[in-house]
Image: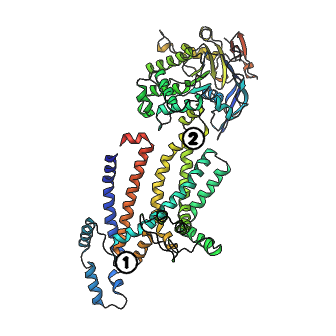
């Protein structure tokens, strides 16, 4: 197992290197001059040049890249020009907000999509199959910013059921003591149900927005995988053995169908990490997505690079986790690795 | 329950499949019976309806398939009239089935011992270590070496022969009255084939278990069956005791089938292939589906219905001009 993890990490290294190079170059290709931006509209040409030298932007691209890599090797992602804080610290402080939201959305999507897919496959042509088809089509065709704005409009503006979309807690509440950084967990650790409820209320709309977007692929994949498994030879044997419908569906069919579903979860999760940027903007969520978005608008290189690198690393870790889970579910893969 | 009545009676069983290109009448008014403890062989080419008949008896037809007519009476109960719940109580307990290609017919990601245990738990009211012990005992009974280790093994770690033994263990776990074996040895190497078939025979004798042995191979069927049902294109064309069928086949197709089966002392040149193929089972079919391949056909053969004649007790043939 450990050897497999080591090997997967080694395989991922070239990918990470590629990400480092591409982010660096893309950032340099972006329009806008950070030095001019930070000097402000009233700055003289000389002041701008001074800032340019200070930022190291007067050097050649290879030199800048060498400096960037040297800092990376030391575990430094540079300093944000807007806030003056180290990028790594800022990212780490904001990461729990994004992860909490993403994981809640994933949990919600799986909790809805998996049963839908299973039931749709168990009863093809039934109302639940049609319902699944409708949900899949709708989920695939609704752009995420639209779902988000629609939910805010209906549940906050029209119905007044949801709290204003202003971040993780309303402005007058104070955040729980940081243990994990996830408010839902930290508030429970503090034994404060009121605070838990307050943060849960804030979570609902952004979770729905993200969840609805990824429901569709999970439900579709579950249905397809279950249909494939249900018509397989070994299911016929299991039926010939007179096993109970529950054993057939959950012990025999579902576990076999989970493999492709797990694969699709990997793609879904990375998609979620990406669309977080939009959802965090709509709900003023203080996560790394909105952080990166602001940095891009300010031509602030370091946070953007840090963000992309962090995403790439998360993606690698996630795929590793999926590979490990694969081995847990499927004995054939355990042997091969 | 009187044991003079047959264990299984199949009466006028007809099965249709809806396909994109029309309705396929895969099985048409098939009738035969299986008595307690006897081995009945079903033989025919691919597409003759052997497996469909077996699956219809089990109630395991593909959703596109439908039983349009007939009765399947098992121990005095019509399995087709009862619901899925009733069939589920019989399956695996009194009526078992094993399949071709055992390696794909077992759950690929569940240890084989567990799969046997699932059947035992379901039907034999055993739980915990007693169910496990029973599963281990069954592995030993089907002569798998080192049951303790095989219990933990996954199908992909075992040979096809061992997988088929596992499937037999699952099928006989609850001492069924009838075992349907659909091409149980096809795809295995010759020595393994013989071993598997011997194992089935041994169980059949020890437990007075009736067997419906399905194969395309007349040699296999001939060696191991008490009676033989010959199928062609969804029809039962002839049915007789094994010795009688080989000595005096009455249907032209059976005669051809015997002539085309390798036997000791025969050279390759002695084998006579049967002309033509199984007809397309869609659309309008002649009463006798062997008509187009038959060299004895007379004009009356085109008139319905297909006759079913009992020439001597227990020997029936579906032909107007039997040999």
Look at mark 2 in the image and give the residue it sits on.
A230
Picture coordinates of residue B322, whole percent (x, y) = 68, 13
Looking at this view, name the residue that lies furthest to the front.
Answer: A191
Q: Which mark is residue A113?
A: none
Callout 1: SS: loop
Q: Residues within 10 Å of mark 1 (few under 14, many from 20)?
A: many
Disc 1 to disc 2, C-alpha distance:
53 Å
Q: Is residue B310 left or right of residue B209?
A: right
Q: Where is residue A3 drawn, in percent x and y?
A: 31, 46
Decide: is B57 above or below A117.
Answer: above
Q: Residue visible at 52% across and 68% down? A: A195
- Is residue B201 shown above or below A154? above
Whether residue B250 can be seen here: yes
The colour style of the image is rainbow
Looking at the picture, how far across and down is residue A99, in whole percent? 45, 63
Regarding mark 2 in the picture, which secondary structure is present there?
helix
In the picture as drawn, the residue positioned furthest to the right comes out as B304
Q: Chain of mark 2?
A: A
Quadrant location of residue B71? top right
Q: Earlier in the sequence, mark 1 or mark 2?
A: 2
Give the class, few, some or many, for how many residues have Cα within 10 Å of label 2's Cα (few <14, many ≥20): many
Q: Place residue A198 in its image quadrant.
A: bottom right
Q: Residue at x 40, y 29 (%)?
A: B149
Q: Residue at x 37, y 41 (%)?
A: A336
Query: How many numbered discs, if any?
Result: 2
Residue A164 at what x, y percent from top left? 56, 75
Write down the residue under mark 1: A299
Which quadrant of the structure image shows residue A308? bottom left
On the rendered image, what quadrant is the N terminus of chain A found in?
A: top left
């Amino acid at each position: 197992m450990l050897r497999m993890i080591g090997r997967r990490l080694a395989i991922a290294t070239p990918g990470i290197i590629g990400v480092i190079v591409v982010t660096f170059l893309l950032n340099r290709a972006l329009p806008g001059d950070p030095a001019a931006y930070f000097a402000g509209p009233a700055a003289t040409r000389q002041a701008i040049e001074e800032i340019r030298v200070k930022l190291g932007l007067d050097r050649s691209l290879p030199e800048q890249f060498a400096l960037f890599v040297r800092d990376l090797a030391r575990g430094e992602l540079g300093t944000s020009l807007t806030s003056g804080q180290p990028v790594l610290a800022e990212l780490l402080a904001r990461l729990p907000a994004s992860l909490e939201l993403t994981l809640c959305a994933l949990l919600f999507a799986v909790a809805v999509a998996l049963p839908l897919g299973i039931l749709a496959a168990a009863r093809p042509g039934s109302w639940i199959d049609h319902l699944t088809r409708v949900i899949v089509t709708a989920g695939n065709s609704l752009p995420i910013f639209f779902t988000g704005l629609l939910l805010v409009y209906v549940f906050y503006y029209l119905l007044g059921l949801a709290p204003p979309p202003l971040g993780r807690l309303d402005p007058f509440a104070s955040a729980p003591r940081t243990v994990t950084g996830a408010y839902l967990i930290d508030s429970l650790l503090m034994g404060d149900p009121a605070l838990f409820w307050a943060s849960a209320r804030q979570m609902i709309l952004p979770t729905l927005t993200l969840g609805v977007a990824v429901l569709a692929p999970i439900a579709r994949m579950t249905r397809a995988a279950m249909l494939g498994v249900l018509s397989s030879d070994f299911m016929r044997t299991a039926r010939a053995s007179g096993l109970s419908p529950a054993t057939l569906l959950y012990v025999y069919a579902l576990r076999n169908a989970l493999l492709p579903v797990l694969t699709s979860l990997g793609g879904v999760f990375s998609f979620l990490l990406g669309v977080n940027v939009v959802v965090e903007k709509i709900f003023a969520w203080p996560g790394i997505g909105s952080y990166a978005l602001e940095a891009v608008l300010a031509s602030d290189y370091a946070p953007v690079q840090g963000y992309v690198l962090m995403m790439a690393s998360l993606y690698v870790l996630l795929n590793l986790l999926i590979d490990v889970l694969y081995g847990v579910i499927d004995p054939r893969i355990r042997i091969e690795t | 329950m009187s044991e003079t009545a047959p264990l299984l009676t199949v009466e006028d069983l007809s099965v249709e499949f809806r396909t994109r290109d029309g309705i396929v009448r895969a099985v048409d008014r098939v009738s035969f019976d299986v008595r307690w403890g006897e081995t009945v062989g079903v033989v025919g080419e691919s597409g003759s309806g052997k497996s469909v008949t077996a699956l219809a008896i089990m109630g395991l037809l593909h959703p596109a398939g439908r039983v349009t007519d007939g009765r399947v009476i098992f121990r005095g109960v019509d399995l087709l009239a009862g619901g899925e719940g009733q069939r589920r109580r019989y399956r695996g307990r009194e009526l078992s089935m094993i399949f071709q290609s055992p390696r794909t017919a077992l759950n690929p990601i569940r240890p084989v011992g567990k799969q046997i245990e699932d059947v035992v738990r379901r039907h034999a009211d055993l739980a915990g270590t007693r169910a496990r012990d029973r599963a281990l005992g069954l592995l030993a009974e089907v002569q798998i070496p080192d049951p303790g280790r095989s219990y933990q093994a996954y199908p992909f770690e075992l040979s096809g022969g061992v997988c088929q033994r596992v499937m037999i263990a699952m099928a006989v776990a609850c001492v069924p009255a009838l075992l349907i074996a659909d091409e149980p040895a096809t795809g295995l190497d010759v020595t393994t084939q013989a071993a598997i078939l011997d194992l089935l025979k041994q169980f059949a004798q020890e437990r007075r278990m009736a067997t419906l042995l399905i194969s395309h191979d007349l040699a296999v069927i001939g060696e191991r069956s008490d009676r033989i049902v010959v199928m062609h294109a969804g029809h039962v064309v002839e049915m007789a005791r094994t010795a009688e069928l080989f000595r005096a086949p009455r249907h032209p197709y059976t005669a051809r089938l015997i002539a085309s089966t390798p036997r000791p002392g025969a050279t390759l040149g002695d084998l006579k292939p049967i002309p033509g193929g199984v007809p397309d089972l869609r659309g309008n079919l002649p009463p006798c589906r062997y008509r187009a391949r038959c060299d004895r056909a007379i004009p009356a053969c085109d008139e319905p219905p297909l006759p079913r004649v009992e020439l001597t007790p227990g020997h029936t043939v579906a032909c107007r001009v039997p040999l």
